[in-house]
Image (tube, rainbow, N blue to C red):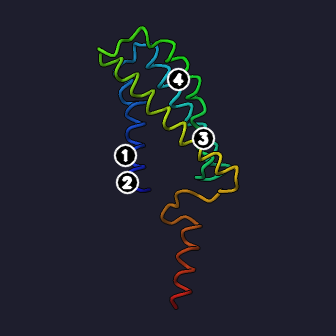
Amino acid sequence: MPLPWRLWLVLLVTGNLLVPLLYLARLEAQVVIVTFFTGGILMTVITHYAGFTRLLGLGHILWIPMLCFLWSRLDQHPPSEFYGVWLRGMMGLNAVSLLIDAADVARYLGNDRKETITWFGSAENERSENKVEQEEG
């Protein structure tokens, strides 16, 4: 996975899991954490059936109602406090991620169904390596 995508994932995990753990007593943080883990389960199911494809963008579908809920509560958390800053920043990151996810799902529906990440030792990776060896030999 290219470095920029890894950094993006670190930002998403930090904003959707690590920071909300600091605010477990607050309803918004609880909703974010539950949505994070529920989305993870959904992504696991999608990966089981479709592989690591662009269809994984559907795993963030639960962010839409979460963002609507959080939007309705922004007036209770001013941007002058860190909690309000986190809430707005996380919502912005998630909104951008949803745009990327929508583009990915559209590409999947347009028949771009190849695996986006091939792991070392995966069957597809081994086939590619064998093909290269045969062409060289």
Q: Sequence order check: which comes first, mark 3 or mark 1? A: 1
Q: Residue at point 64% right, 51% down?
A: 107
Q: Sequence order check: which comes first, mark 2 or mark 3? A: 2
Label 1 sits on residue: 7
Specify the label residue 3 is tagged with: 2
Q: Residues within 10 Å of mark 4 (few under 14, many from 20)?
A: some
Asked where in the image residue 99 lies, by quadrant, the reply is top right
CA separation in Å, label 3 and label 4: 16 Å
> Label 2's element?
helix
> Label 3's element?
helix
CA separation in Å, label 3 and label 1: 20 Å
CA separation in Å, label 2 and label 3: 22 Å
Mark 2–mark 4 CB contact (< 8 Å) = no
| Residue 18 drawn at (x, y percent) | 37, 30
Residue 69 vs 123, above or below: the answer is above
| Residue 122 drawn at (x, y percent) | 55, 64
Mark 2–mark 1 CB contact (< 8 Å) = yes
